[in-house]
Image (tube, rainbow, N blue to C red):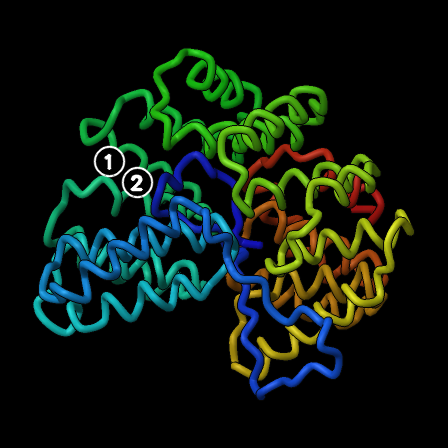
Amino acid sequence: MSRAHSCRLLYGLLMLSAALHAEARPIPYTPADDAQIVETLPAAGDPDLRALKALRVRLAATPDDLNLTLDVARRNIALARRNADPRYLGHAEALLAPWLQRTPTAELLVLQATLLQSNHRFDAASATLDHALQLEPANAQAWLTRVTIAQVQGRPADARSACARLAGLIDPGYALACLAGVEGLNGAGASAYRTLEQRALGGSAAEWERGGLYVSLAELAARLGRHDEARHWFDTALAAAPDAYTRAAYADFLLDAHDDVAVLDLLAGSERADPLLLRLAEAARRSRRIPDAPLVAALNARFDATRARGEAVHLREESRFRLRLLGDATGALALAQRNWSVQREPADARVLLEAALAAHDPRAAQPVLDWMRATRLEDVALRDLVHRLGA
């Protein structure tokens, strides 16, 4: 999961984790046991789902209502991020498609770019944002999305430039936090942390912004080795917005702390989302509290299905899966290198360094080492891997 991501603060309602995964099976499947659960339907009492269902009914009656279409599309995107369920992205794509064949508005194009970004089609997303900004240069969401894509692709100068364009378009404090999020990945972690912390504690952050802000603080604290602060902000983020990205990031922190039982508790019942299933399987393997074999088999099947569909969205997670759960260092390294050619966040650097180390191929780590020097990234986990590689 991509999702992932570094400057989560920037996502807002419409941004997506780079680690959303698909689950569809290529052929019909008939369970051999009537007791076997093949699908868990969303909770009927989920207020977001109830609201979405009601809006879909309205939209079916008024299909030419663009504003309603946009609202339903946004809600689908938000649910995709919350649940790490790409089917909602498909619903949003289907809603937008007929409108994009007409004369698209900037708002439509920004949503399309968000969907392209979530499918790791970053160049296409950037081109779509260019179009949107030609139509509406002051579209704040377009600039926010541009920041996110630049961050994911490891282009800090472009991310700074996009943050600067936000000044005057949105709350100045949010624009400042945007810049802090960029600088936190480029050699100014301590000062960025202070800026984000002031935003979090000052009471001026909007409600929708808080979850992303808290998890940004947690991840930054973890990279700086400030573990108590990281745990505090992860707990705070989880209380504010327990979405799939936050739970995955917190699970990674707990796995690094060898608190595997806490991971099992955190992710219990989360098998539906592939990023969470991956972390659950890792915790199961190490803790031996629950059998890990069914989880590993499920992940294997899902990655096979992803490849069968010709998708390459999950390379980071698959590399991690092959290394940590299958012990396939060579396969993991190949996947990590392919992934690095597409996205360059700390998590992407980590899977490549870990795979290069396991494969006894330190030269394969050179692109990451060059990137770390260029960005002056501060990250205690990556620093340890670099040391073990002898670089």
User: As drawn, which residue projects farthest toward the front?
Assistant: 34
Q: Nearer the viewer, residue 105 or 244?
A: 244
Find disc 2 in the rendering and name its residue. 162
State which quarter of the image contains the N terminus.
bottom right
User: As drawn, which residue projects farthest toward the right?
Assistant: 288
- In percent of width and height, residue 267 lies at 69, 46
Q: In which quarter of the image is residue 337?
A: bottom right
Find disc 1 in the rendering and name its residue. 165
For the residue labelled by badge 2, is the local secondary structure a helix, a strand or a loop?
A: helix
Tell me what residue is drawn at x 58 percent, y 62 percent.
Answer: 40
What's under tag 1, amino acid-wise?
A: Arg
Tell me what residue is drawn at x 18 percent, y 43 percent.
Answer: 139
Disc 2 and disc 1: Cα gap in Å?
5 Å
Q: In which quarter of the image is residue 35?
A: bottom right
Q: Give left or right: position of 365 versus 374.
A: right
- In percent of width and height, residue 187 lies at 56, 30
Tell me what residue is drawn at x 77 percent, y 60 percent.
Answer: 355
Tags 2 and 1 in contact by the CB under 8 Å rule?
Answer: yes
What's under tag 2, amino acid-wise?
A: Ala
- In percent of width and height, residue 7 lies at 47, 38
Q: Give left or right: position of 359 versus 174.
A: right
Q: Which of 218 and 273 is in front in this view?
A: 273
Q: Residues within 10 Å of mark 2 (few under 14, many from 20)?
A: many
Q: Which of 84 and 2 is in front in this view?
A: 84
| Residue 369: numbered disc | none
